Amino acid sequence: MTTLGDIGVAAAINIGSAFLFFLAFAILRLQPFNDRVYFPKWYLKGLRTDPVHGGVFVRKFVNLDWRAYLGFLNWMPEALRMPEPELIDHAGLDSVVYLRIYLLGLKIFVPIAFLAWIVLVPVNWTSTGLEGAKNITSSDIDKLSVSNVHSRSERFWGHIVMAYAFTFWVCYILLKEYEKVASMRLEFLATEKRRPDQFTVLVRNIPPDPDESVSELVEHFFMVNHPGHYLTHQVGFPGYFKNDNFYCCFKYAVSPLATVSIFMFLPVPLLIVNNNFLFSDEVIYDANTLAKLVKKKKKLQNWLVYYRNKLERTSKRPEMKTGFLGLWGKKVDAIDYHTTEIDKLSEEIASERKKVTDDPKSVMPAAFVSFKTRWVAAVCAQTQQTRNPTLWLTEWAPEPRDVYWRNLPIPYFSLSVRRLIMAVAFFFLTFFFMIPIAFVQTLASIEGIERTAPWLNPLVTVPFIKSFIQGFLPGIVLKLFLIFLPTILMIMSKFEGFGSISSLERRSASRYYLFNFVNIFLGNVLTGSAFQQLNSFVHQPANQYPITIGTAIPLKATFFITYIMVDGWASIAAEVLMLKPLIFYHLKNFFLVKTEKDREEAMDPGSIGFNTGEPRIQLYFLLGLVYAAVTPAVLPFIIIFFGLAYVVFRHQIINVYNQEYESGAQFWPDVHGRIVIALTVSQIVLMGLLTTKKAASSTPFLIVLPILTIWFYRYCKG
Amino acid sequence: MTTLGDIGVAAAINIGSAFLFFLAFAILRLQPFNDRVYFPKWYLKGLRTDPVHGGVFVRKFVNLDWRAYLGFLNWMPEALRMPEPELIDHAGLDSVVYLRIYLLGLKIFVPIAFLAWIVLVPVNWTSTGLEGAKNITSSDIDKLSVSNVHSRSERFWGHIVMAYAFTFWVCYILLKEYEKVASMRLEFLATEKRRPDQFTVLVRNIPPDPDESVSELVEHFFMVNHPGHYLTHQVGFPGYFKNDNFYCCFKYAVSPLATVSIFMFLPVPLLIVNNNFLFSDEVIYDANTLAKLVKKKKKLQNWLVYYRNKLERTSKRPEMKTGFLGLWGKKVDAIDYHTTEIDKLSEEIASERKKVTDDPKSVMPAAFVSFKTRWVAAVCAQTQQTRNPTLWLTEWAPEPRDVYWRNLPIPYFSLSVRRLIMAVAFFFLTFFFMIPIAFVQTLASIEGIERTAPWLNPLVTVPFIKSFIQGFLPGIVLKLFLIFLPTILMIMSKFEGFGSISSLERRSASRYYLFNFVNIFLGNVLTGSAFQQLNSFVHQPANQYPITIGTAIPLKATFFITYIMVDGWASIAAEVLMLKPLIFYHLKNFFLVKTEKDREEAMDPGSIGFNTGEPRIQLYFLLGLVYAAVTPAVLPFIIIFFGLAYVVFRHQIINVYNQEYESGAQFWPDVHGRIVIALTVSQIVLMGLLTTKKAASSTPFLIVLPILTIWFYRYCKG
């Protein structure tokens, strides 16, 4: 059993590493040559340029002002300073509401921890249930937990009353928060500048018509079905090719009634079409060759900029060799050479574009249709268009930058089959992931090492190393396993065919949450104590489930405390250091960057990463709620996580992360729902635990709680 | 164990009683004095009047034409003759689609029975698995079932292949039928005359406003939110009083744009407002006294008609006494007396109406809002109106006759609480109903009687009585228990606060289905063999459930066969006889009827009764699908049920049932979903059964089936 001392060692290690990360961050962020790593958000918004301190050359790279180093945690209050409305302007509603999840954690757990420590901790601590127990080596943490209360004790009424108090508090806060987020969303949508996607509907599964092209068909269909409201449309038929580069060109709907500028409705990769997108047709083409040509042109243009800069600096026309890598061949004037090459390419691009445009084969059955008013778009997006409910499927158009083009042309039936396949695949992924984790954890325990590698015995018996293995290793093992998971889940969501990045992330998040629940929560509760329990679990009667989990829960408190410290403290602190982007930026800067544009592209600001971040938070909600009535000692660790993470992510959102899309906090119902699930699980676990404690009269009182909680969920859902 | 002989006796009894019912029906329906009992639908439509054969007096009551009695089953082909489109005009789409459920049963089970009998029956019959078994007394039915196949036999592959074939066939038919019903519904809605409820939205939870009345509030709200589309509205605030009689008065929206006649939008009980409903305000009042006055007036008017008829017949002005029951008091001219009384009452009604109208206290926060186009109404019904999602709740207005007034003013929070209470109540109802059923069935078995009432032994051992007890009694016991259930469920649905009769019936139906599933299906499968199994069931591991049910299923085949004969054959045949309405009609006719209007009201045509009928059909789908691969001998009985019920109900719908509302086959998704549930259950049961037969290699093949079925369901749901 892990003792308080072991936890102390783990805490010291984690606090130490967090401190080191913060220190390194404080030093690195003040260096001008790291400016683009630690403040990319401001560069992307065009509000910051490379610092030029002038004078001494070294100042360009190293900050020599010693006063700047004094307040090395100053970024924390700075991060908290920006008010919420300004933050919405700066980073979008999604980011702000995402931060509110951390705040929600604090709002929920600070009062709960307070209550639990003044009521439950004395009740548990003054009991003597563990003293007489044989076979169980109890730690000090266990003395604070419900395990220390005698079976059949009247003291359990304290836990039951607290369970009620916790439930009502969580539901109250959830309800308030839901109202707040809903009103923020509505306000955001209402006050936002008129965005074209609010007037636009994505139409999928357009049926083939022998007489008309897709474009004509769409026009006629909506002219007839929404007369007087139809504005314009874009038939989208992205093909599949390597680089996710699609070529797109628009006809501008020259309607006197046009209230929407269709120009704005350009998907992100379309900057390649520059100033000539007002032509031909409203279609997106399968344009593999075209994309290659455009890429080549972009590269040449970059070189041209580089040579022009050189000319300005040296006032001498740069020369180059035309052969391989510029090493041999004819010497020519570089600027002239590139200008003519670019002209040639532009012509090629024009003809290739024409060729692709005239080819009807690449037409895919999807389109963006714009209406004159938001209201009609809303109606069209939410209603069935034809008798056959599998054709002319409409939904709100995602934001331009949010569109996941590759999935737009997938037909309905195929979508359905893909969902089935992924459901089965996810089941297997979740189920079979448990085996390696349990295996490695058994190896990484003291007993496991003694058994499998007896030659390590002298090392393992060193007290410090023993504490390290017990307090640190299980968390690390778990963490390593989970690094590759989000990528796999994201690929699965993409295969399922969602049409926008935001929905892909929401889907991945809910899968990740399920995975965490089964493998991290249940997996550790049950396999940690004995892997064999897992198998027996499947063969147990339904009424045994809560009892099995309830029995194991208090025993795993110390494991989860170390897990929280590793994953919740040290990792969060490491997040702020941005080690990977830092290294990559400097490597790129050294080897590849020639022009300003290249430097721009060398930045890797990253994003919130809803698909990984949110499920992680949810795990803490789950642990906090489950342990609130069982082992209140866990709560302070969770509160520190929420507080720390709130500050760190607020800083990151202000200074670093690039906003990839704006969904207007569409993810909130998911967040809300998962906290309710966590609450229900905590109630069931407590019920099981009290049953093993022979507090049988408690069951009727506790069974009311999950029913009320589920009712609360349904009430909120409407 | 029940033998083939027992089943023969039961079949003979049931076929005999069905035959008797048909014979009685054939004789009774031809008698002119029963005409209003057996053809009320035609009277209600005004297409039939009381038969006057003229001449002989006795002909008015008894049909003396002997030829009419010859083809006593002639009503059957007659019932089938009316083509579907005509039937839709005659009885509504709901009725026609309801009949299609029976047809669906035939479409599913005829080919399945064919396949099962040519493949599975030979496979089972030629096995010898039951010969060596000890302890089990097998009947001949069992020899046809999967029980007769040896454990670990390769023959089970036949059952697995058949399970696949059945699944694909059911899914195929379901998909076709869904498409058909959807297109029927759309066609019906499109070709229907413009019904006002298609332009109207029901608004609930209108928030109180200190400055405006509800009526003004509604008008301003929709004027602002749907400018140019708002037509008119009716604020509904029915109070609660005894007879569900509400008083209602409308202001006709004198709009030049009005495309809907608001006149048509009168709830059924409003015929009392006769020709003066074009006045005052668009409100419905709490009008208890008013309703009493109106009722009194109606009664007096009926008497007036009676005396006028008398005057016409006898050419002598009728006289009456004004005292108690007309037995003493002053003698007056009856017609004059009633005319003046009615005038007095009319005045009283007018002043009472004014009083109620001016009282703002009875205003309830609900209204009907009409729009100029269906499209806008659709939009309004499906969208959120305000920021607070619990206010201004909109939904499609039910048909006038479909509105359940009493529930309209229930606020959102209260609805939510009611739903919770009813969910808990339904759980207890379902759970505790099992105990009495099981108890009575144990008593009603031969062994039970021998144990509890040994003095009945000499009687019970008579072979015929023994067969009767075994073949007939269990079904009867079950049936008796279930007679009062639909009423209870309907009251529960009403308490839950649904706003239309159709949704009340749909809700009751789904509850009734659940009840049937747990108590009739599971209850009989498990308690029938041993009541103790039920308790052990709760304490079994999850993977034991299918095995427990799978083991018990083949043993209960004979019980369900008798159940089908009692409930499915004899009861259906009894339905056509209309015994209860027949008796009540003649009693009323004899004692109460004075005028034509009274006779009109003495008729009790009844209605389809979706809330009881549909769950009953679903039970047969469940039994059929479960036994298809296990005991194919059950299938012919089910096919006979579906065929017989189809003919009987088609006849009833054409000639008897009154259409209470028209929901446009909104119930189909429920029907579809429950058949899919039945299919899934059948697959799981087969899996459990084959596991006990040690055909372990079959599980992977069978587990694919429920997954595919659920996927199919989700695919259909979209």
Image (spheres, coloured by chain):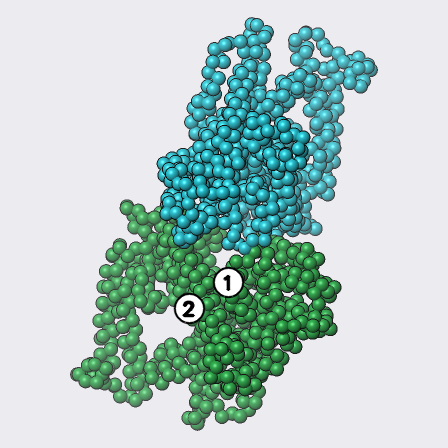
Chain colours: A cyan, B green
Query: Would you say A109 lies left or right of B545 here?
Result: left
Depth order, front residue of B113/A355: B113
Amino acid beneath label 2: Thr
Query: Would you say A575 lies left or right of B431 here?
Result: right
Q: In this view, does B214 lie above or below B14?
A: above
Amino acid beneath label 1: Asn
In this rendering, does residue B119 appear at all? yes
Secondary element type, mark 2: helix
Q: Which residue lies under the disc numbered 1? A: B535
In this rendering, does residue A231 appear at all? no
Q: Which residue lies under the disc numbered 2? A: B487
Evaluate if marks 1 and 2 touch, with contact meaning CB atoms under 8 Å apart: no
Chain where mark 1 sits: B
Depth order, front residue of A686/A60: A686
Q: In this view, does A114 lie above or below A656?
A: below
Choose top left, top right, bottom left or bottom right for residue B96. bottom right
